[in-house]
Image (cartoon, grey):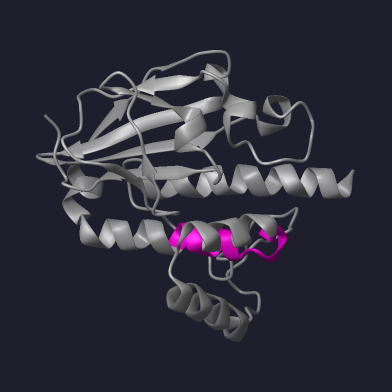
């Protein structure tokens, strides 16, 4: 039971982390929370933090960058927390590259349709000619039927899809895996492709514009 609770807690934490880094507002982090924290009390900035461990993990992620193979390795060893650090690093880097998008950009909820629509949170952030699309799972325990498996791929999402507000003029790419996501019918994205092998997604438009 403890392992099951921890597994779905990690999935919830990844979704929460992505949302915190992409919704309107300024994200706040407690020191030490770059990796998993299995605490049943509020975070405490006074506790000791193993900075050496975190510096080593961050350096390893930086040297490897994130490829589909790297992402697969992180999901296979999710319990070590590096997957959370990757999500934080990539999202913060994206915010640094596009500060206006995240500080002043519009928040656009995206419609999700299909059998698993209730299990996805999807929205876009748009500012002038720049945009990102954010997709995370919710209620993953029910989504997977209680099985300790990632909420990824067609076996989970089936025909569930989201509709973009406009057709992107460039390729869509998941910042966490660097994999391109194909469009269906010009403006639709299947969640089985968006979340093909990684449990959360921030999609960037490689040409940074919509038409």
**Residue 21: image x %, image y %?**
40, 50
Would you say the magenta stretch is mainly helix, strand or loop? helix
Residue 186, placed above or below residue 206: above
Q: Is residue 147 left or right of residue 68?
A: right
In the image, residue 10 above or below residue 138: below
Residue 19 visible? The answer is no
Provide residue 185's location: percent of width, then percent of height.
30, 18
- Residues 48 and 7: in front is 7
Residue 145 appears in which quarter of the rendering? top right
Residue interval drawn in magenta: 77-88
Q: Is residue 159 magenta?
A: no
Residue 82 shown in magenta: yes
Picture quadrant of residue 83? bottom right
User: Residue 40, percent across and down?
Assistant: 75, 53
Spot occupied by residue 124 in the image (x, y as percentages of width and height): 30, 33
Residue at the location (74% across, 47% down)? 7
Residue in the picture at 58% in, 34% down: 153
**In which quadrant will I find the C terminus?**
top left
Q: Is residue 58 left or right of residue 43?
A: left
The quarter of the picture where the N terminus appears is top right
Q: Nearer the viewer, residue 181 or 52?
A: 181
Taking depth in this image into account, of 163 and 184 the one nearest to the observer is 184
User: Is residue 164 at least partly visible in the picture?
Assistant: yes
């Amino acid at each position: 039971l403890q392992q099951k609770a921890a597994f779905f807690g990690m999935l919830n934490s990844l979704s929460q982390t992505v949302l915190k880094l992409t919704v309107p507002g300024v994200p706040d982090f407690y020191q030490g929370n770059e990796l998993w924290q299995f605490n049943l009390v509020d975070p405490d900035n006074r506790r000791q933090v193993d900075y050496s461990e975190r510096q080593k993990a961050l350096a390893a992620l930086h040297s490897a960058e994130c490829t589909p193979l790297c992402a697969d390795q992180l999901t296979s060893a999710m319990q070590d927390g590096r997957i959370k650090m990757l999500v934080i690093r990539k999202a913060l880097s994206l915010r640094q590259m596009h500060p206006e998008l995240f500080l002043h950009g519009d928040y656009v909820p995206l419609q999700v349709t299909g059998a698993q629509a209730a299990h996805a949170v999807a929205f876009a952030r748009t500012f002038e000619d720049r945009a990102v699309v954010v997709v995370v799972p919710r209620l993953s325990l029910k989504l997977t039927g209680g099985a300790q498996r990632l909420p990824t791929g067609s076996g989970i999402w089936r025909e569930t899809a989201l509709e973009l507000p406009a057709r992107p003029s460039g390729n869509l790419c998941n910042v966490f895996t660097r994999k391109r996501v194909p469009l269906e019918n010009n403006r639709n994205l299947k969640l089985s492709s968006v979340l093909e092998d990684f449990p959360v997604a921030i999609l960037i438009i490689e040409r940074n514009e919509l038409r």
